[in-house]
Amino acid sequence: MWGISLKHRDMKFLNQGKIIGLLLNHPLLSRVDLAELAAVSPAVVSHIIRDCLKEGIVHEDSEGISRGGRKPILLSFVPDSKLVAGLVPGNITEFAISDLSGHLLYKEEIASKKYQTPSELSVYLKEILNKFLMINHKSWSQLVSLGIGIPGIYDPELDLIHKMGKISNLFEWEGTKIREIFSRVFSCPILVFDKVIAIAFGEGILSSDGPNVNLVYLHLGRGVGAGLFLNGKIYRGSQGAAGEVGYMIYGPVDEKGPISFHEIPPLENEISLNTILKIFREKCPNSFPSNQSLSENDEVMILHKTFFKGDSQCEAILKPILEKAEVIATNLVAILNPDLFVLGGEVTEIFSEILLKRMVQRLHQSVLFPPRVKTVTLGKNEEIMCTLFFAIDDYFQRLTGKNQGLSSTFLKRYNPQLWNE
């Protein structure tokens, strides 16, 4: 009896996924159209559409052309019937709200030092959301998912943040149960994940043609990490630490004893943006204007201009750093044999042309089956965008019993330029 019930439930989810997928792909379809295209009975379609109308994600749009009887009612998917929110903590924390199409409705940058603990931040975000919902005549029931992309190691089984990368303002987050804390304030499902996982997922959707892509995303920024999207699924590892390439060994082993959670991973310490800027300030002090306080963005611009002017000292600083990044990429590709290798992060953004060229050359020289190599599709908003995509996918999967492909169907039509204007 249990087996029959389970089979019936799985079939219902499968059919629901088919029907919603068709409505995502085609703006206006009748119930008869859906039955024919999904190869299911009209009764099944009617039952599913009744649930979708009740959920609010589908509405009866207009009358179609008659095939001899009454004019059929055409149905359409309603992306703004539900909302998702995304949060990426950092020195500057990003928070955004979108509808189910990934269309940005609200975005704010928050100085993390103002709300250093997860509890403080969650209360502030509730205030923001409350104002947004009131202004836009929305309700809390329309918020269906909150995605939190952390810059660190998160164990989803224990709901535990083991480590928060190199961001000193967020040390208060280490050792906390983030999902539990945010669930006290928000009634919608809370997703917590390493932000590079979300980027790998987003790139897997937007950069591939098939559902079973094997993709590796390498993030070279203030921190260093990799997101693994293997056979169309995120791979996290046993404790959520898969892809922590900062712990890879490169060169002679330094026998200094076991590393602690609060230490910066050895290889990450050598190739992060913070390290590059520190060495650049020490070895090229004349590149900076005297008696002038500079922001990190100013320093990055000076580094970029100095390097591309062909400054020999600057090139000497960056050569070993870029070589180490190439070694990380080569080892990941040799082990995982991906179809696609994607580069992102601030270091990639600064040196994209030279880094991409070097990576392609190294991989073609060093591995048997070099993958396609590209930089991120999503530009400067990649982290928060992919966090929203992850939250959207979670909602679709709950609707269809973990069936894959709906997010891919809809988000592939999304235009990242809307975010970058």
Image (cartoon, rainbow, N blue to C red):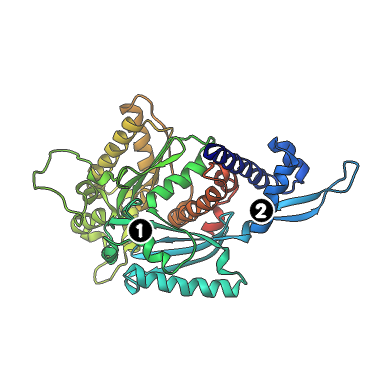
Figure check: 116 above or below 407: below
Q: Residue at (33%, 65%) from the top-left corner?
A: 91
Give the Cα distance between marks 2 and 1: 50 Å
118 and 277: which is toward the camera: 118
User: Is 305 placed left or right of 340 in the picture?
Assistant: left
Image coordinates for residue 73, horizontal then vertical, percent: 80, 51
Check whether the beta carbons of the residues at disc 2 and disc 1 lie within 8 A of each other.
no
- Image quadrant for the N terminus? top right
Q: Nearer the viewer, mark 2 or mark 1?
A: 2
Of the residues shown, which amino acid type is indicated by label 1?
Met
114 and 319: which is toward the camera: 114
Q: Secondary structure at mark 2?
A: helix
Q: Residue at (38%, 37%) from the top-left corner?
A: 357
The residue labelled by disc 2 is: 52
12 and 181: which is toward the camera: 12
Residue 301: numbered disc: 1
All told, the count of numbered labels is 2
User: Residue 323 lies in what quarter of the image?
Assistant: top left
- Image quadrant for the C terminus? bottom right
Image coordinates for residue 233, horizontal then vertical, percent: 44, 40
Q: Residue at (91%, 41%) from the top-left corner?
A: 68
